[in-house]
Image (tube, rainbow, N blue to C red):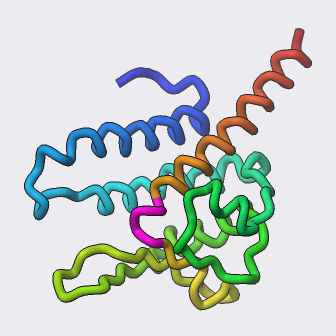
Amino acid sequence: MGNYRNLEFDFLNRTIHLIDQYTKLVQKENFSEQLNYTLTINCLLGTIVMPKERAIDYIPKEELNKETLHRMGLTHTKIDNSIQTLRELIKNLRHSIAHFSIEIESECNRNLIDWIVFKGTKSQPEIIARFRAPELYPFLRYYANSLNENLINLQKQHDNGSS
């Protein structure tokens, strides 16, 4: 189980690690029992909501352009044009997740999860983002790594300042 030394850092990393562990184990299950997207959507609380609430200043302000979206693993995902940075995207996703304004879309009558749609609330865009399902986890990993880098740099600055 372990202890938390830095809740923001540890919780985010453990949430990503949880998805990694499940991804390795899920292939042993029958297809109908594979709940990888259910787990990933559940883990949005630990990757998006908690960091936004506790570490907003360290969420990267990286510009969302074709090149960065590609680095994030987003080739088919659509993000509302009004959202210009990763931090803005995370803020908007947080509202969608916290209010469970999420929909699943299937492209066939087998009801497979093809798209995960994050809808806006109140003054947000109607649709914040429409993630191609297999792109959600690579995006979360990219985002978590970027946030971790910022948190590590902050810790180093803090350690150097207190010496």
Q: Considering only vertical position in the picture, is 128 above or below 87?
A: below
Quarter of the image for the C terminus: give it: top right
Above/below status of 69 relative to 7: below
Count how many numbered circles sit on residues in the image. Answer: 0
Of residues 62 and 123, the one nearer the viewer is: 62
Residue drawn at (11%, 50%) of the image: 29
> Where does the image place residue 103, in percent across and percent down from the top left?
40, 81
Q: Main secondary structure of the magenta part?
A: helix
Classify 104 as above or below 138.
below
Residue at left offset 51%, top offset 26%: 4
Q: In the figure, is residue 62 to the left or right of 29? A: right
Provide the residue span drawn in magenta: 132-136
Quick check: 51 above or below 13?
below
Query: Is 125 in front, or is 84?
Result: 84
Q: Position of residue 97 (x, y in %)?
A: 50, 69
16 on left or right of 8:
left
At 11% across and 64% down in the image, what residue appears?
Answer: 32
User: Extreme left residue here?
Assistant: 30
The residue positioned 8% from the left and 55% from the top of the image is: 30
Q: Is residue 135 magenta?
A: yes
x and y, in percent, of residue 116 in the image = 42, 74
x and y percentages locating residue 19 in the rendered image: 37, 45
Q: On the image, which quarter does residue 22 sit in?
A: top left
**Image quadrant in which the N terminus is located:** top left
Residue 116 highlighted magenta (yes or no): no
